[in-house]
Image: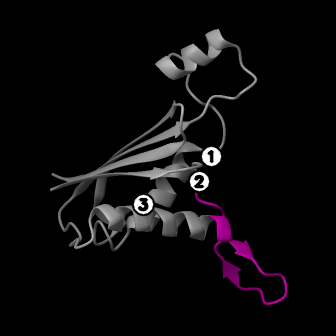
Amino acid sequence: MKYEFEIPGKVTGKGRPRVNTNTGMAYTPTKTRDYEDLAKQYFLLKYPRIKPLSNRVSIEIIAYFEPVKTVSKIEKEKMLEGTVSPTKKPDIDNIAKIILDSLNGLAFIDDTQVTKISVEKKYSNEEKVYVKIEDY
């Protein structure tokens, strides 16, 4: 079984848990929670009657970033053809973590099933995250 979908918009990485200084309770930052909900919604839009995968899982994640507007046309061309990669935030491990956490219990039973993962950052004219999930 294979699932493929895209999450349009600004790429967001998993934020660190925060602690409320008044209560001492840890919480997930709103930006992280909102992006996880967005990823779930786009997955469910494409696969509304999904049954979570139960075998080992392979995931491919490609995060697309828009080139900075202040670069030259030549540099922008290099970015878009893939000879220059984004080296800006969010970190690649935080991109993977937010996608895995958002699909946990939805696309697969638990993220411990993920035994193979590929994450890449590229430039594109529109920001989005492409996700492909396969059992193998």
> What's under tag 2, amino acid-wise?
Gly
Q: Which mark is residue 26?
A: none
User: Quadrant location of the N terminus?
Assistant: bottom left
> What's under tag 3, amino acid-wise?
Leu
The answer to which of marks 2 and 1 sits earlier in the sequence is: 2
Q: Real-space Cα distance between discs 2 and 1?
A: 5 Å
Label 2–label 1 contact, CB within 8 A: yes
Q: Which residue is mark 3?
A: 100
Secondary structure type for disc 3: helix
Residue density around tag 2, few if under 14, some if 14–19, many if 20 or more, within 10 Å: many
Label 2–label 3 contact, CB within 8 A: no
Percent x, y of residue 95: 52, 50
Q: Viewed as shown, does residue 122 lie left or right of 54?
A: right
Q: Viewed as shown, does residue 61 lie left or right of 126?
A: left
Q: Which residue is mark 1?
A: 90
> What's under tag 1, amino acid-wise?
Pro
Q: Which residue is mark 2?
A: 13
Specify whether residue 25 is painted magenta: yes
Label 3–label 1 contact, CB within 8 A: no
The boundaries of the magenta stretch are 12-31
The answer to which of marks 2 and 3 sits earlier in the sequence is: 2
Secondary structure type for disc 2: loop
Query: At x 61% / y 18%, what residue is drawn?
Result: 76
Percent x, y of residue 23: 79, 90
Q: Residue 20 occupies which quadrant of the picture?
A: bottom right
For this orientation, the residue located farthest to the top is 74
Say above or below: 63 vs 96. above
Secondary structure type for disc 1: loop
Query: At x 28% / y 67%, what residue is drawn?
Result: 108
Q: Residue 33 occupies which quadrant of the picture?
A: bottom right
Query: At x 63% / y 31%, what residue is drawn?
Result: 87
The answer to which of marks 3 and 1 sits earlier in the sequence is: 1
